[in-house]
Amino acid sequence: MRAVAFDCFGTLLRITEPTNPWRPLLAEARRQPGARMLDPRREPILTIEEFAAACGVPFRPKWRDDLDREIASIAVMPDALPVLSSLRAAGFRLALASNLATAYVEPALALLGDSIDTDCLSCDPEILAVKPEPAFFSALQRKIVLPAAEILMVGDSLASDVEGAKAASMAALHLVSGETSPRPGQIRHLADVPQFLGLNQPGSS
């Protein structure tokens, strides 16, 4: 392995006060005749107001308030930055690989700072694909500029992160923090990633 790609929410970052502003917006779209059911993770639309307009539904200020509160509650997982630093020091190329609505991109990247080398995000106009779609993982490989066999994907979603990566010939680790006895291919903590890669072991550099 020469690179590690991490999912965003539930893996490197967490939302401590989820408000799910997209859910009522899309529920409103389902009720509106002629409205469009768009996926906020797949659209390069900057604001929730513009997203509502693209769907064809009247905007409600509560959606903006809920989104602002959710974004303000984003926090870095306790062991995320030390793990990224350890992997960077060992020479691994690091990527953020996530299904994100555009509104979350800047806050997420700001919290991670220069801890990652590149990002592959579903809302990127050059990608517009979501995990586990093959197009997403093809884009991830292009972003990292390495063969799929040299990339490890780490995330908390079995379907999106693990199965999607494996279908693209990448290795994968499933982060299952609630498991007391992780099975092969599962880890309980991000700090287990360096150990999986042979770091922090006697005789390792």
Image (cartoon, rainbow, N blue to C red):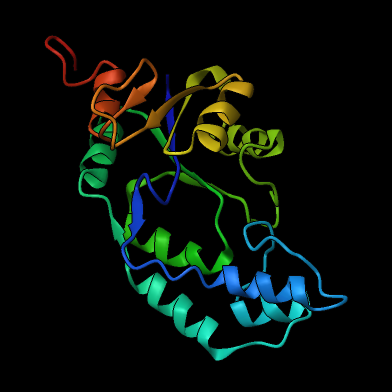
Looking at the image, the residue that sits furthest to the left is 202
The quarter of the rendered structure image containing the N terminus is: top left
Residue 27 versus residue 97 in the image, above or below: below
Looking at the image, the residue that sits furthest to the top is 203
Q: Along the line of sight, which residue is nearer the eye, 23 or 47?
A: 23
Residue 196: x, y in percent? 30, 19
The quarter of the rendered structure image containing the C terminus is: top left
Instruction: Give the residue at x 32% y 69%.
Output: 73
Residue 59 versus residue 20 in the image, above or below: below
Looking at the image, the residue that sits furthest to the front is 31
Instruction: Give the residue at x 60% y 30%.
Output: 164
Residue 68 versus residue 162 in the image, above or below: below
User: In which quarter of the view is residue 169 placed?
Assistant: top right
Q: Looking at the image, can residue 147 be seen?
A: no
Instruction: Give the residue at x 38% y 48%.
Output: 10
Is 149 left or right of 69, judged from the image as shown?
Answer: right
Residue 166: x, y in percent? 57, 22
Report how many numbered discs are placed on residues in the image: 0
Residue 112: x, y in percent? 34, 54
Residue 150: x, y in percent? 49, 19
Residue 131 versus residue 110 in the image, above or below: above
Instruction: Give the residue at x 38% y 77%.
Output: 69
Is 66 left or right of 143, judged from the image as shown?
Answer: left
Q: Looking at the image, can residue 205 be seen?
A: yes
